[in-house]
Image (cartoon, helix red, strand yellow):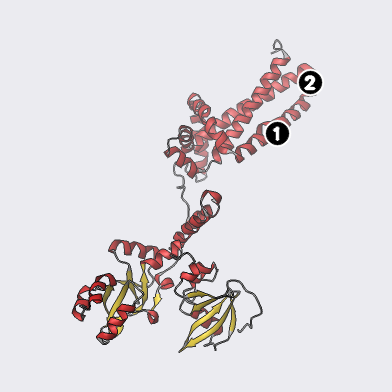
Amino acid sequence: MNEIPLSALFIILGLLIVLSGFFSSSETALMTLNRYRLRHLAKAGHRSARLAARLLERPDRLIGVILLGNNFVNILAASLATVIALRLYGEGAIGAASLLLTLVILIFAEVAPKTFAALHPERLAFPFSWPLAGLLKVLYPIVWMTNGIANQLLKLTGVDIEHRGAESLSREELRTVVNEAGSMIPRRHQKMLLNILDLEKATVEDIMVPRSEIVGIDLEDSWEDIVSQLGNSQHTRIPIYRGSIDDVLGVLHMRKVIPDLIKGKLDREQLEARMKAPYFVPEGTRLHTQLMNFQRSKRRIGMVVDEYGDIMGLVTLEDILEEIVGEFTTDPAAGSRHLRPQEDGSYLAQGGISVRELNRVLDWRLPTDGPKTLNGLVLEHLQAIPEPGTSVKIHGYPVTIVQTQDNKVKTAEIRPTPRGKQRKVS
């Protein structure tokens, strides 16, 4: 060692510090890689991503070869620094040399490389995977032995290295990923993805047309009234019943009767012959389940029934799709069948509008685990049937009762954001 020039020793020491930084940064880079992006790149044929993915399949071996190399170069650097200190200043400089080397390694081989690797993991992990894979092959016997001892110690504490938990995202974790996607996913697409996740929490009662608002044709009406209803219908599919909606007979697609209706050739027998058998949906059915049921049964409309078989309301495929993509109009609020914008910026809402529709159209945050409609929210808050002109704040949103009918709120004026002084009733 005394024959080696000091300049050569300093060069070797510098190379060892660089190698130490290599091992430190490669560990951080590989361990902080986005696993889902890594899988995507590996499936797309990225060679370095495939190699990194293979290394990460056995993190114990990867960490073993990294730590083996890192400790070897650090110990060798410490020994070399001691030799340099002895040759320059004697034994009294060994302590100072150790302190100086510790600071150098800490800054240049640990903190700086690891910080850079944490900020740019792919830039380091992919190219560094190749030399690490080569080292793993060369040093495999030593890595295997050290990992074997370490794994046995882990088993004594109840940790089984062979059975790692599956890397899967919960619904809330996936929601966080979508929200933090930023510009990678357009905001509208983010909202659609989040709405799909919300389908698991909502049921058909949250979006159904209430029983009292179902528009259908009663076969006990006069034929003139039936023809008038058909001619003025705003719906493509109409429930057909006899006497009461509980005795629903089927669903009529207007396309099947329009030609004969125009020609005046339609009669009761043809009307009944062309309707389709009703499709019933049990209450409590989750929206994502009902979406699949509609697709499987090739239906677009269903009658929601309770445990006694009584009709509670009507749900359509379009209602579920609107929960995902929003209203099928240029102006969502203008397109809502229960909500009409006013010139002063307020909205005139029907009492039967669902809470979910209010949240979706106006971007509100009303709770959906209680009453399902605006009427239900008002009645729950007031504990009484309100008089027209009554104003109330529900979860911070001003609502003014415009019209009541029987025992319910028929229409109300609402504002997207509170403004002006409202008389709060509680």
Q: Is residue 86 left or right of residue 67?
A: right
Position of residue 349 measured from the top left corner of the image (x, y, whole percent): 50, 77
Q: Quadrant of residue 268?
A: bottom left
Q: Are marks 2 and 1 in contact (CB under 8 Å)?
A: no
Which quadrant is the C terminus positioned in?
bottom right
Going by the numbered disc 2, the residue's amino acid type is: Glu
- State the residue position of label 1: 107
Q: Is residue 343 left or right of residue 220?
A: right
How many marks overall?
Answer: 2
Q: Residue at x 46, y 88 (%)?
A: 407
Position of residue 348 measured from the top left corner of the image (x, y, whole percent): 52, 78
Observer able to see residue 286? no
Q: Residue at x 40, y 75 (%)?
A: 209
- State the residue position of label 2: 91
Q: Residue at x 63, y 37 (%)?
A: 116
Towards the viewer: 69 or 312: 312
User: Of callouts 2 and 1, which one flags the residue occurring earlier in the amino acid sequence?
Assistant: 2
Callout 2 crowding tier (Cα within 10 Å): few <14, some 14–19, many ≥20: few
Callout 1 crowding tier (Cα within 10 Å): few <14, some 14–19, many ≥20: some
Q: Is residue 11 left or right of residue 53?
A: right
